[in-house]
Amino acid sequence: MTRNAMIDEWYPVGIAGQLDAHGRKTALMGEPIEVGRGEDGNAKVTGANGRALPACIRYGHVWSSLGDPQKPLFAIPEADQPGRRLVDVGVVRVRCSPLRAVENFLDIAHFPFVHTDILGAEPHTEVQNYKVEIREDEDEVWATQVKFYQPQAAKSAEGGITTEYMYRVPAPTCSILYKTCPPRPGEWDVITLFVQPLAEDLCDVWPWMALFDDETPMTDLIHFQQTIFVQDRSILENQIPGLLPLDPGMEIPTRADLTSVAYRRWLKRHGYTYGAQLVAQ
Amino acid sequence: MRLSHGFVRGETLSCIYHGWGYAQAGNCLRIPAHPALTPPDTIRVATQPVEDGGGIIWISVGEPAAGPPRFEGLAPLRSMMVEADIAALEAVAGTKADGDLLDYTGNAPTIRLLLAPQGQARTLVHVLVAEGSSQAERIAASRAAEALRRAAEDIAHGGIAR
Ligand SMILES: [Fe+2]
């Protein structure tokens, strides 16, 4: 049995602003953990049998690992850019594979059907060609030049616009979306999907945003993202098979799915198989 | 994603996830992400014979020898998903299922449940009531079915907790 490569990765386990001395009970890849604030004021995460787990606070969240992370948490330079509003969206519990949650986040072709009249609308269903690569230096999956017509791309968008997207996958259960920023052309809004794997078929999804938007009330920003993720949940909880297939099987990918194809290939290459299935079905 | 979550427009059944549309013969007609593409004939879904009988839609696996069953004097009320197996439903109803039929008489008029297992611990239940039931009777029957569902799910979850 080879060691699961995902053990040594960082995962979100809670919102930093909600840390308290009592601690919050949750789980990481099947192991019960407790997330709280230690006497030194730092985040303190303990695993089964009270063993201390690695912990850090970044991007509004507490991060931990069951193993021994070989690298610091991935960088999001935009997080420190002045003028951005940082939004802790909260948590959405989804009964699905954590990898499925990320794959769905990378998919734009479902916008007109799942996020109807918000992120997409018929007849604007076409996914134009875009670029996908696995960047070897950073060891990340990137999709760029992704364009899609959106009736209401963001809370700050008025009317339909063609939105440009870039996607980044810097860790097996995390993705960062860069998106056209209506009030500030030339900059990108940052929307992330941080997924906490509770089990192979259960996850807590912690979306987080770093936006140029001084107008929209915080409640509306949170509500907008939660609406989107709850729509995704109804899809994710009905996917068949539940685990993400890493080998070609019954599915027929099209050009629109190239990000997903690269993500699956990258997962397989690294042995990131928690929440995946290797045998085709 | 099951096509049963999808939508029908004209004679086309479309998937709710990406909108791929299928004809009655099962061949794919349309991939909305690539409108200019004519889907190859190899993209198709399995089809089953289907029949509408007594307000219930039936499908058969393979070629059926006869038409679907008729339940004289009964009319469909509602369908619901129960997160429990048939044994749990039987335990709560206090009677055994006869094949895929379970008749249940609680405090309300008798209801007949058509049971369609969905994997290990989930059952799709179609609820029938006496034809010509009043609105009050139908509401009572619906509540009885709900109560049965909750009780069966309690048993199922208790089983997991142990
Ligand atoms: Fe979505």
Image (cartoon, coloured by chain):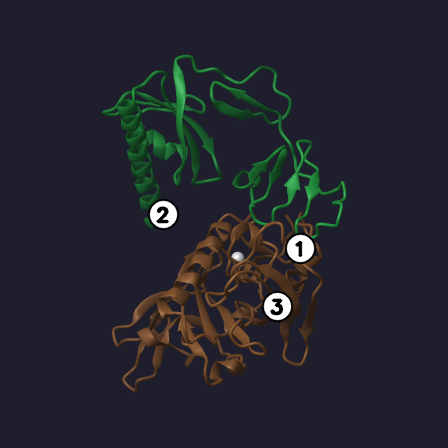
Residue A183: x, y in percent?
51, 74
Question: What residue is shown at x 54% (from left), y 38% (from top)?
Answer: B4
Chain letter, green? B
Q: Looking at the picture, tell me which residue is in the foreground, A2 or A280.
A: A280
**Residue A66 at least partly seen:** no
Could you tell me which secondary element the residue under label 2 belongs to?
Answer: helix
Q: Looking at the picture, tell me which residue is in the foreground, A159 or A75.
A: A159
Q: Earlier in the sequence, mark 3 or mark 1?
A: 1
**Residue A69 at least partly seen:** yes
Chain letter, brown? A
Q: Amino acid at mark 3?
A: Glu
Q: Amino acid at mark 1?
A: Glu
Cβ at disc 3 under 8 Å from ligand 1: no
Q: Which residue position is annotated with label 2?
A: B160
User: What chain is tagged by disc 1?
Assistant: A
Residue A145: x, y in percent?
67, 69
Q: Which residue position is annotated with label 1?
A: A126
User: What chain is tagged by disc 2?
Assistant: B
Could you tell me which secondary element the residue under label 1 belongs to?
Answer: loop
Cβ at disc 2 under 8 Å from ligand 1: no
**Left or right position of B92 against A127:** left
In the rendered view, tell whether residue A177 sits above or below residue A94: below
